[in-house]
Amino acid sequence: GKACYELVHHSTNPPGFCPHGSLLGDGKEHAQEIHEDTLNADFLVTASPLHDEEGNVTGSVHVMRDITELKTAADALRLANNKLTMLSSIARLSARTRSNLVTTTNDALTYLTAGDTTRGEYIRAGREVDYLPEKTQFIAQQDRMAYMVGMRHVISAEEVSGTVLLGRFGSEYLLVGDKLAQRDLPQVVGSSQVEALPLMVSTAGLENVLIGEEIYAAPAYLDHAPSHLASLQVQDWLRGGIIVLIVLGLLVATFGITIGDYFLR
């Protein structure tokens, strides 16, 4: 038989995050979420010890649970929430400037809330008469290619002066991005799919592309909600602290400093 790291990770050695390796070190149960590139999937990996009558570890139960769908659903929910927050900010600006806002989506749940979100901002701005419910449009449930074809039609039919496009788009984005670039229309774009980013940069310009966590951070800066901004600041501080610890660890490893001996002197 072969070891799991050979079959799953296509490696000659166990990975550093292996819960089974941690179990062998302390005899306790361990769990780790991983993304396995060889399978293109996310897993929750657990290792639980087996003991004899005297409490000695005699083996372990090593389990990989596929959580790809759960992770995808959680990411989609988070992205949908941020898109609605951004829509609220854009609708507020449109109401104040008496601009016509056209909202499109390929998700039924987002469609059901998008209209109410837009209408609410027009009401708060005292411009309810300017709100046009037919401008909130549903295009092709969860079919990204069909959605982009529909978007091309919307761009052609409406007097578009600019676009904000966020979602889980891949290479099909080019159907819309290229058309907007040809018409020299300003666009702000972002995708959680890495393969779309080079296409977005080529058509919208690097300064107009939301990359990585910027997709989730942008609505907070637009909405200026204190709780959202505070959350982003805390995350930035934590990232900064982790970077400092990594640098200190590298210095300790490079110069062979023993922290314990340093404090005992």
Image (spheres, helix red, strand yellow):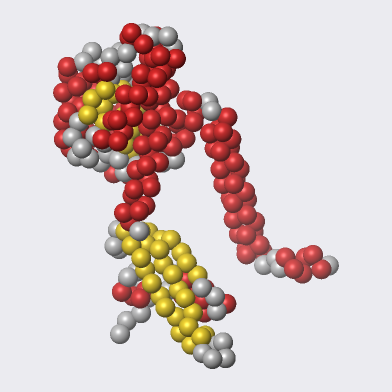
Indicate left or right for 191 with 240 as reference. Answer: left
Question: In what quadrant of the picture does the N terminus appear?
Answer: bottom left
- Residue 76 in the image: x percent, y percent? 34, 43
Question: With respect to residue 256, does 146 lie above or below?
Answer: above
Indicate left or right for 61 with 37 as reference. Answer: right
Q: Is residue 176 visible?
A: no
Question: In what quadrant of the picture does the C terminus appear?
Answer: bottom right
- Residue 42 in the image: x percent, y percent? 35, 58
In the foreground, 214 or 119: 119
Q: Residue at x 62, y 54 (%)?
A: 245
The image quadrant that residue 35 belongs to is bottom left
All told, the count of numbered labels is 0
In the foreground, 154 or 84: 84
Q: Is residue 244 visible?
A: yes
Which residue is most to the right? 265
Q: Residue at x 39, y 14 (%)?
A: 122
The image quadrant that residue 113 belongs to is top left
Q: Residue at x 32, y 59 (%)?
A: 41
In the foreground, 148 or 188: 148
Q: Residue at x 42, y 78 (%)?
A: 61
Question: With respect to residue 92, does 62 lie above or below?
Answer: below
- Residue 94 in the image: x percent, y percent? 37, 14
Question: With respect to residue 194, does 35 lie above or below?
Answer: below
- Residue 57 in the image: x percent, y percent? 52, 85
